Every structure is written in structure tokens, then in C-alpha cells.
Amino acid sequence: MANSFTRIMSGRNTAVILASIGAGTLASGYVLSDNTAAVAAAERTRLYPPSADFPDLRKHNNCMAAALTPTIYGRLRDKTTPNNWTLDQCIQTGVDNPGHPFIKTVGMVAGDEESYEVFAELFDPVIKDRHNGYDPRTMKHPTDLDASKITSGMFDERYVLSTRVRTGRSIRGLSLPPACSRSERREVERVVVTALAGLKGDLSGRYYSLGEMSDREQKLLIDEHFLFDKPVSPLLTAAGMARDWPDARGIWHNNEKNFLIWINEEDHTRIISMEKGGNMKRVFERFCRGLKQVEHLIQERGWEFMWNERLGYILTCPSNLGTGLRAGVHIRLPILSRDPRFKKILDNLRLQKRGTGGVDTAATGDTVDISNLDRLGKSEVELVQLVTDGVNYLIECEKRLERGQDIKIPSPISPFRK
Amino acid sequence: MPFGNTHNNFKLNYKVEEEYPDLSKHNNHMAKVLTKELYGKLRDKQTPNGFTLDDVIQTGVDNPGHPFIMTVGCVAGDEESYEVFKDLLDPIISDRHNGYKATDKHKTDLNFENLKGGDDLDPAYVLSSRVRTGRSIKGFTLPPHSSRGERRGIEKLSVEALTSLDGEFKGKYYPLKSMTDAEQEQLINDHFLFDKPVSPLLTCAGMARDWPDGRGIWHNDSKTFLVWVNEEDHLRVISMQQGGNMREVFRRFCVGLQKIEEIFKKHNHGFMWNEHLGYILTCPSNLGTGLRGGVHVKLPKLSTHPKFDEILTRLRLQKRGTGGVDTASVGGVFDISNADRLGSSEVAQVQLVVDGVKLMVEMEKKLEKGEAIDSMIPAQK
């Protein structure tokens, strides 16, 4: 904890925090509560060994429940990250949400960057399970945000209605949404909004704080499908991500309304580049350019994104590690989507379909949301190229079926680069 | 380690104004009392079990409340919360419980023989009678804070105590997580089954964690005495029956409670109680007796009388719909119960219900005959 603060302090012109808190106040408060709390904690450990607290996961179907054994729990229960985040807090959402026989959720979240390290004994097998066997102990994740490498990135707009790329970024040194205090969350908002104010040209825009939005602004943002609401999914609320709503939450978008950032929803930031039509290349180019500029702007003030070469970009949910990237289209495939081979084609192309309302929604009419399945183990460029090639293939199939021609199921793509 | 903001000390690195919640749109007791200064004074404290100020207030921060309904907006995580955070909780308790002072003493009276009458409420109007309260078991943290191990410990101890009861109290325990479909169906039909809390007032306070682990329902064979384990409190104890014999309901309530308490005391885990706050429960609104004694009563004419609400206030009673708190009345049938919890005894509160309901039934009968009831309207109790 001390180290991360020193790092922040040295890089930043001190507009806020630390200095004004008298060291004496801090120390005495700490000591007073520390002593009695420490005694009680020791007594509690004696009365309640890890076996007394081990959750009943017999009816559960999520990655955490599949990986957590009494032995692992025993070893990790009394550990804390430098910010005092615990294993029980990581897994609470998975304990409270047993899951669905058909859908395997992750079942745990990180409270801070160090969670992935301190609780690696549980996170690693969960990451392996969720990300096709990716082993954080031995493998490296590639990062590549060079949009110029994308080929054939312009789709037939008779089929592709809209194109979108999203990811998330976390600010190093601040706790993640399940764990963050109000001041940390407000700090995230300050850091990001200050940086975004520095964007120029086609990226310049403005910020709308959720708590201070006018009714008219709110209506406009809803109509444009930009507004995010207080999470109702128990997967998120049980992880503590809706605390203090709507404090320090907001939406930023550029004037052209094709580059959008959510602040303090499920991650510190969610970055979205989107537009009507099928120009994936342009969407991804703006995505990469915007990301790089935001990163540069926060670095100027001594901040950086959470990233390491084992796990790529660090986000709240292990399912979003690596690139955190979901690149996709809303596409009309009236014939192909009814073809019994559709699912297999998608599987082999490593694509996923969702309804046009996003995750956990059904398709309306013939329009489906198609995006990459994978997040970790391949770079951004590789994933976007994969989606590009895949969508082009699906359009080709649809056209062939229109003409009464047969289609082929493509050979399966490997989840990792060789 | 029990659930909660274990990383409280880390937050102390930030200034008070950085951490102080935005309560500008809030309407609950906590928001009225918690100034920035008070927040600054209490934020570095924790109970010996590690429950912190932010833990106490989280539910009130997350639930701004309603312009017309004043919720409490805070919970206790253990017995010591009421002591460590007294600078916040005492004014809230005073506000909620009619000006109850930090120096006041609460009287406990569970001697059912002190109740006068109560066995003659007209069953043509009074459909059912019920008395409930809560109890917390010393030595354990409360539902917002308890770990799975503790919750299971509470369940084990409670089941041991309850299954040792005999006579009119002989009964059976149904753990929520291993209930059969048939058992579940029966308990729903009996209106006994409680479900995973959906109210954000409860879920934001962490009370639904690990559901349904450690939760269950016990009831006696005649289905007149019922105990909920690990819902919003360690124990919720309910005595009920059809008809208007509140006296009998209260007798069974008192006798059953005392029997249960004896058994817990033998295990060195008596109930949480002190002479200032009476019985200690999770929500400050339930301190004192924690008692809600009430009836389902048919008052179709009286309930539409312009002075109905005033009459209730003067009688120190409260109306609810027949689905319980936050529901509407159906067919002129109301749930009428005592409004007070702290500052008067169990006997006194049930007496108010008995006397008040008797009076209101008389008024209803008068209104049926087309007569006025103005002379019957009572003075403020």
C-alpha cells in the first residue's frame, strides 16, 4: 500500500489528499482500533477455522465453485491484499449466485490489482477455465493496438447495420468497483474526466455526471442508447458494484457521438467506439487512437492503466482480462440464423451471438449481435481481424444461401496464437 | 473474517470530504443526522468485530428513501455497534422512537398475566391475531456482518434450543436449503415461508449473503408458534392464530420466549439486551421490545372515515395492508398493530393494541348503524 501511494505522490502535482491529514490523527485512530480488532480477529480465527466458513457450493455451477476446494480456501481465507481486500469478498458474488445449468458464470471478482496475485491460487484455475486453458503462470498475453493492420474491414451494409468495439481500463493505484471507497471512485472520475477534457478534434466531447444530469439530457442519452443504469443483475449487486449509486458515475461522449466512455459502472472505465454501418476499420482505428490519447493524457499527470504481461489489461471480472475487448456488429442474417449449422459455424469462427439488447437478451427479428468469444491470449488486432474475417464469412454464407447454394462449416480456429 | 469493509484503515488516507457520502437527495433518519463533522469523528472507529461506520450507513446511502416514508437508513453489525457509534445512533433512535433520550431506561415486561382482557375481540371483525418480535444471540455478530461460520453456529444453537421444546411447543425445523418441494408448498400455504430478501433496504446491508445457507423455519405442530432463523435478525419469534384471542396469543408468545431464552442461557449464549435499549436487534427501529402485536381486522366503514388516521395516531397504532409492511389493504381488511417499540414494555404495547382494536370495532359497529362516532374519538395516548 505504501509503495503504490509513493508512486502516485511522486508523479502528481498534489491537488488533493494525504498531506492535510495529520499523521497523528491517522496513527492514533489506527492504533486504537487496531489493538482490540486484532485481539478479536485472533479469537475469531480460533473459534471459526476456515472449515467453518467454507461455502456450500454443491448446487453451484460457476468457475469459482468448480475451482475452490477446502484446501485452497484454508490457505487463502486469512490473507489480504495490501488494501485489506479478502478472498471472501472476491467470491461473495459466486456464492450468492449459484448459476444456471446452461450458463457458466465466473463467480468471482477482483477488488484491486493485487487480488489477482494474492489469490492467484484460485484466480489462476478460474482464468484457465474461462479462457480456454490460458495459464497465467507460463503464458504471456500480447497487446497490439495498431489499427492499420486490419484488412477487409468494410462490411456489406445491406447486412451489417452497426459496428462497435468496446473494452475496459482500470486506473492503477485505485481499488476496483467491488472494493473502492467513495473517495477512490471520485478520484477515478476526476482522473478520467480531466484526461478526456484534453481530447481534441473528432474526439472532443463532454461529460454527463449521472447524479447531476437533467431530465432532458437523460432522455437524450437513453434515446441514443448511451445511458447505463444502476445495475440490477444480482451478479453485479452481490459484488458490491452498485454501492453509493449514482455517486461518481457518468458518461462521456464526443460531439460526433461515436466515441463513448462509461465511468465507474462495472469497471473504472468502459471505452466504446461505434457507428452505424459496417466500417469496422474506422471504428477500430478511432478506438485505438482514442485509447492511446486517453492513456497519454493520464500519464501526463502521473497515472497509468493496470496492465501486466501475464494478464494484459486488469479488469474487475476475470472474464474481461487480456484485451477486455468485445468487437461486434448488429447484422441481419435471416436465412443463415435459421440454418441448423449456424451455431457450429459461429463456434468454429470463435464468435458468439447475443440479442440486440446485449448480453442475456434475445435476438429481435433477424438481427443478431455477433462478436468475439475470446479476450485473453490474442491481441486486439488479432481479435478484431478474427471478427472481421468471421463476419465477412457469415455474409458470404448468407449470400450463398440466398442464391440457393450450399455453405461450408469452416475449420475451427485455435483460441491462442501458436 | 466476517464480511464488511475490512479495508477501512486504507480509506483514512483520504480526507473526510472525499469520503463523506452525498446525502443531498436523501430522506432517511441517517441522512438527517450524519453531518460531515460527525462522519469525520466516527470514520476511524470500528467495533471489536471490525464493523465500521461505512458498514452501518451503507444501506442508507444506497437507498435515498421516499419523500413520504422515512426509513432508518442504518443497521448494527453487532451488539457493540450501538456503543461505538452512539453519536450517530442515539440521535437516530431519539428521532425514530419519540424523543427517547440517551439516558432513558427501557422496561421489559413479558409477564402475560399483566395484560388486561384481550380474550374477547369480536371474531366477526378480528380475523386473526399475531405477536412477533426478534432476538439476537450474544456472542455472535448480526446478519449484516456475520460470516458463514457464525451464521451456521447461530442456526445450530437455535435448532438445538427449539427442538428441545415440548408440550404445546413441540415442533420441527425446516432448513431452507434442504426443504423438499412438498414441505415448501405447505409452508407457503401456511403463510410461514420467508423468501430471500429482495428489498434493497436489506440487500444493501448485506443480509442476503450466502442465501440460503444457515436459514430456516421452525414451527410447532399446531402451527401457532413459529421461529425464523437468520433472516433479518438471528431469530424472529411469532405467535399467531385465527380469531381475536390476543390474550392467548400473547401468553403463548411470552411462555415460548422464556423457555427458549432459558436454553440459550444454559449454553452461555443469552439474548442481547441492556437496560437502556432493551432487546438489541439489527435495525434500530426494532429496539426495545422489537414487538409488533397486531390483528387483521375488518373496518370497511371506519377506514374510510376522515378521522381514521387521526384515531390510529391517538391510539398509538399503525395500519398496514394484509401483506405486511409496504402493502395495501384488501377488502377493507387492515393489519393494525402497535407503532411503538422502545420506551414501553411488551405488556403495555399489546395492551394498546387490545384496547385500541376493541374501541375501533365498536366504532365500526356504530358506523354500520348509521350513527356518529365523534364522541368516541379518544384523547392522545
Image (cartoon, helix red, strand yellow):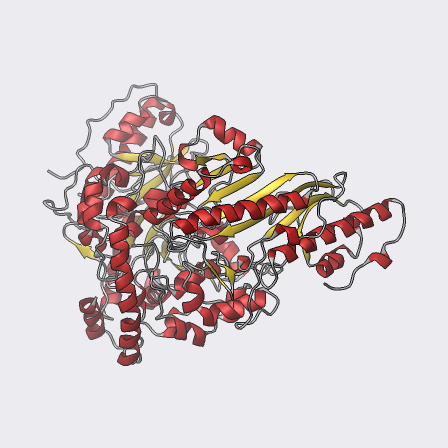
Q: Quadrant of the N terminus of chain A?
A: bottom left
Instruction: Compare residues A166 and B307 and report the one nearer the observer.
Output: B307
> Residue A79, relative to residue A23: is it above or below?
above
Residue A143 in sight here? yes
- Tell me the residue at 24%/62% (across/down): A172
Whole-percent x, y for residue A135 in the image: 14, 42
Left/right placement of residue A96 relative to residue B281 reads left
Q: Is residue A149 visible?
A: no
Quadrant of image for the C terminus of chain A: top left
Q: Give the vertical position of A414 relative to B324 (above or below).
A: above
Which residue lies at the image location 35% right of the left edge and 37% below the top edge? A99
Quarter of the view holding residue B138: bottom left
Q: Nearer the viewer, residue B226 or B284?
A: B226
Q: Quadrant of residue A295?
A: bottom left
In the rendered image, the vertical position of residue A362 relative to residue A309, given as above or below: above
Residue B96: x and y in percent read 58, 64
Give x and y (percent) for residue B117.
72, 49
Question: Would residue A309 appear left or right of B277 to someone viewing this image?
Answer: left
Q: Position of residue B199 (x, y in %)?
A: 50, 49
Say how many tags the image has.
0
**Residue B301 vs residue A357: left or right?**
right
Left of A104 or right of it: where is B175? right
- For residue A126, which quarter of the picture? top left
